């Protein structure tokens, strides 16, 4: 039947995971010829596909994931592992393995938290009682960032804290352990002008006199300068501060990173995209009101395939239907499903393009 497709694996990627390529089902008489050309298939896998093709008789399938899991699934470019509930950490790591997650990035927020976060990750991996192969797989999946979130205390002590941050990053980059060298970005850092005194952040507009306001911009620009020096991409936190964020980027002439947890409308997003930034979306998109759903859909469809990233920001922003619970990277599947639906694509395809973007931005092997 013309146009009918199934997922065939074209070539083996590193770590023994197959990368899918969507091909038309050939007539049965061409199947043996196809397999003869694709010598990478083992005889058992070849026989499975041959049997499967003949069995379904051109039944339309969205993917073979129902029958055989050959996909990397659900990369998460932004979570805070040290803030996730202790009894959930091992489950998170095992879920990365089960899903063959390509990329999982643990984010820093304090100038001196990198080493303690790395130690926690190593301890959690050991507690998972994994075999050596799975431990190595996890160490290929998990990466770290280091940065200073714009808390008022950090803003006032910015010179000292940026010095500490640089020393912490350089120490990690020269670590003898290759896993602990994996500093893939600087951040999160940026600007936050969302006033919510009763919230987790405790942001009060009264705290932001002119000294603190300009100090926040300076702290961000100092970290942009450090990222430029170290040739690292930036995890940019920008909330209710699009214009000021853009001004800082222009001042430092450094456009390499992601606008994480993007809550801006399409006009502001276009400005970041035009400067070369990636755009990251979290479970907050699942909170969109019905009256604004069309605007959200328009925005998600506007983002080019080579500029979209997905994240949880765990333990914050648990997506619907898990809203109200502490978030974990396990829940990112709901973010993928909603965005895939709004972009009129499959979850598998969305996972593949996010993995590719992770590889491009953060310099990890695809």
Image (cartoon, rainbow, N blue to C red):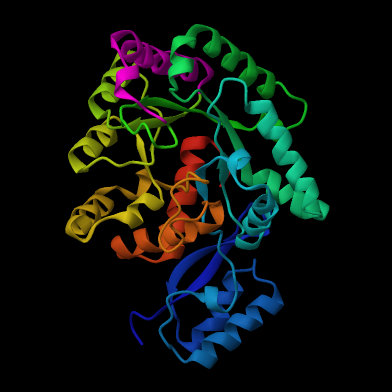
**Is 198 left or right of 94, judged from the image as shown?**
left
Q: Is residue 55 above or below residue 182?
A: below
Question: Image height check: is 233 above or below 269?
Answer: above
Q: Dividing the picture into quarters, in which one does residue 290 lie?
A: bottom left
**How many numbered circles does the render carry?**
0
| Apparent side of residue 217 relative to residue 332 in the rendered image (left or right) | left
Q: Nearer the viewer, residue 33 or 177?
A: 177
> Can residue 183 be found in the magenta stretch?
no
Quarter-of-image position of residue 68: bottom right
**Going 65% across and 83% down the picture, which residue do you hit?**
47
Q: Quadrant of the N terminus?
A: bottom left
| Residue at 48% across, 60% down | 333
Q: Position of residue 130 (x, y in %)?
A: 80, 55
Give residue 101's position: percent from left, percent from top. Answer: 59, 54
Who's the residue at 33% across and 8% down the image?
Answer: 211
Q: Considering only vertical position in the picture, is 67 above or below 29?
A: above
- Point out residue 272 in the picture as x, y percentages from the top left corner: 28, 33
- From the viewer's side, name the closer residue of 139 and 238: 238
Depth check, front residue: 297 or 52: 297
> In this picture, is 177 found above or below 300?
above
Q: Residue at x 44, y 72 (%)?
A: 23
**Main SS type for the magenta part?**
helix
Point out the residue furthest to the front here.
198
* Magenta stretch: includes residue 214: yes
Residue 89 point in image, percent of width and height: 66, 50
Decide if residue 166 is on the left or right side of residue 252.
right
Q: Which residues are magenta?
A: 202-231
């Amino acid at each position: 039947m013309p146009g009918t497709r199934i997922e065939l694996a074209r070539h083996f990627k590193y770590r023994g995971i197959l990368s899918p390529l969507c091909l038309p089902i050939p007539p049965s008489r061409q199947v043996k010829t196809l397999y003869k050309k694709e010598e990478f298939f083992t005889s058992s896998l070849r026989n499975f596909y041959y049997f499967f093709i003949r069995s379904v008789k051109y039944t339309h399938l969205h993917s073979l994931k129902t029958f055989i899991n050959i996909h990397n699934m659900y990369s998460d470019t932004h979570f805070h592992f040290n803030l996730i509930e202790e009894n959930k950490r091992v489950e998170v790591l095992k879920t990365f393995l089960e899903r063959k997650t390509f990329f999982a990035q643990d984010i820093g927020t304090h100038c001196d938290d990198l080493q303690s976060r790395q130690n926690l990750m190593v301890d959690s991996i050991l507690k998972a009682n994994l075999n050596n192969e799975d431990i190595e797989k996890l160490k290929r999946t998990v990466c770290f960032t280091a940065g200073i979130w714009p808390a008022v205390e950090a803003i006032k002590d910015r010179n000292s804290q940026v010095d500490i941050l640089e020393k912490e990053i350089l120490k990690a980059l020269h670590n003898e352990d290759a896993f602990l060298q994996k500093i893939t970005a600087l951040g999160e850092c940026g600007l936050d002008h969302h006033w919510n005194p009763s919230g987790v952040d405790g942001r009060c507009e009264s705290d932001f006199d002119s000294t603190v306001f300009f100090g926040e911009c300076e702290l961000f620009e100092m970290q942009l300068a450090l990222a430029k020096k170290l040739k690292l991409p930036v995890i940019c936190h920008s909330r209710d501060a699009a214009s000021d964020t853009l001004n800082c980027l222009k001042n430092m002439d450094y456009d390499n990173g992601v606008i994480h947890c993007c809550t801006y409308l399409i006009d502001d997003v276009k400005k970041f995209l035009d400067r070369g930034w990636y755009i990251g979306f979290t479970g907050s998109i699942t909170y969109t009101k019905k009256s604004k759903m069309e605007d959200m859909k328009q925005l998600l469809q506007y983002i080019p395939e080579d500029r979209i990233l997905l994240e949880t920001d765990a333990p914050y922003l648990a997506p619907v239907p898990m809203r109200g619970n502490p978030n974990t990277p396990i829940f990112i599947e709901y973010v993928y499903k909603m965005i895939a639906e709004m972009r009129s694509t499959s979850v598998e395809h969305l996972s593949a393009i996010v993995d590719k973007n992770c590889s491009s931005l953060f310099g990890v092997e695809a």
